[in-house]
Amino acid sequence: MIKVGLIGAGFMGNMHATCYEALKEEGVIITAVADVRNSYATKIAKQFGASIYEDGMSLINKADVDVIDICLPTYLHTEHAIEAMKKNRHVFIEKPVCLTKSEGDKLLKAQKETDKLIMVGQCIRLWDEYVYLKNIVEKNEYGKVITATFKRISPLPTWAWNNWLHKVELSGSVALDMHIHDSDFIRYLLGEPSNVNAVASRDSEGIIQQMFTTYEYPNKVVHAEVCWNYPDSFPFCMEYRVKLENATIVYDSTKSPTLIVYPIQGESFTPKLNHEFTENSDLGGNVSSLGGYYNELKYFTNKIKEKGTIEVAPLNEGIKSVNLVLDEINSAGGVKL
């Protein structure tokens, strides 16, 4: 059995708890929960019969667990992850893994010293529709990528504890919190860009609310948009449109079907995907489908059982994606104007 200590019982912590419930038959169970809000921790603890700790550091230092799952606000990731590694725990860290390049260096140093398995919650790498695209490109099934457009847009997220998402020093703004999904996947799909050019729309305090980035690759045009301050009635949407030499593949989370392939020759079609976990969440937030979260947590815990290595979304990859987004923010004029 793999015993999990879950730190953070808010929106994302509850998403993870739902996935761990589905992984019980795989021998994975939450045995400890920590949140500074006791009522939040209690809700999940009752579900699993888990112990409750008043905060993350208490859980790390006292709980009998194999894994620390960090679903805390971003500014708390680094200190908790390093302490967990020092206590000989494997660690799952929600994205973005950290806020700064110096934090990334500290995390890599701690992993090297402890040799623990660390995975970052870049769930798009295991999101079924994005896995499909990755496989198509790797197999060269429709030729090379010519252009690629990614989009992630939503109404203003208002569910965060103490509104931490909208404090740029705590979250890194929409660029680092939300856009990193697409920046990370672009790296995963196409490799490192030679350069990035970004422009941003800001609120009255100079904080980025919307950003458009162009990634420079040889013989490709790659573009991404992010925004999180559309009206409350505006639907969350994640989308890609990738033009290859012999087909165009489109994914739009607001449409049905969500995924369509348009070959140069022949009729368009909807690929049949093997969705292992299809449960949805009613916890609020901007994503209801839990498939990608389940896939990543199953992958992570299987690697622990196998005593393997993390090849999808390892720590160093999560840090490279943070550094790329930081470069994008700088290209757009920095954190604040």
Image (spheres, grey):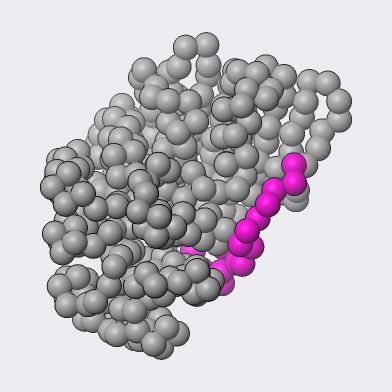
Which secondary structure class fits the magenta region best? loop
**Residue 185 coordinates in the image, percent (x, y):** 47, 37
- Tell me the residue at 43%/18% (across/down): 216
Let me know if residue 205 appears in the view: no
**Residue 176 coordinates in the image, percent (x, y):** 34, 44
131 vs 228: above or below? above
Of 112 and 243, the residue lying toward us: 112
Q: Based on the displayed image, in which of its 4 quarters is residue 64 positioned?
A: bottom left
Magenta residue check for 198:
no
- Tell me the residue at 42%/31% (across/down): 187
Let me know if residue 78 appears in the view: yes
Of 330 and 5, the residue lying toward us: 5
Q: Residue furthest right?
A: 267
- Span shown in magenta: 271-288
Name the quarter where the N terminus is drawn: bottom left
- Tell me the residue at 29%/39% (across/down): 316
| Left/right of residue 128 with respect to residue 329 in the rendered view | right
Name the quarter where the C terminus is drawn: top left
| Left/right of residue 225 with respect to residue 193 in the rendered view | right
Of 270 and 285, the residue lying toward us: 270
Q: Based on the displayed image, in which of its 4 quarters is residue 92 positioned?
A: bottom left
305 vs 30: above or below? above
Q: Residue furthest front?
A: 306
Magenta residue check for 275:
yes
76 vs 36: above or below? above
Of 333 and 256, the residue lying toward us: 256
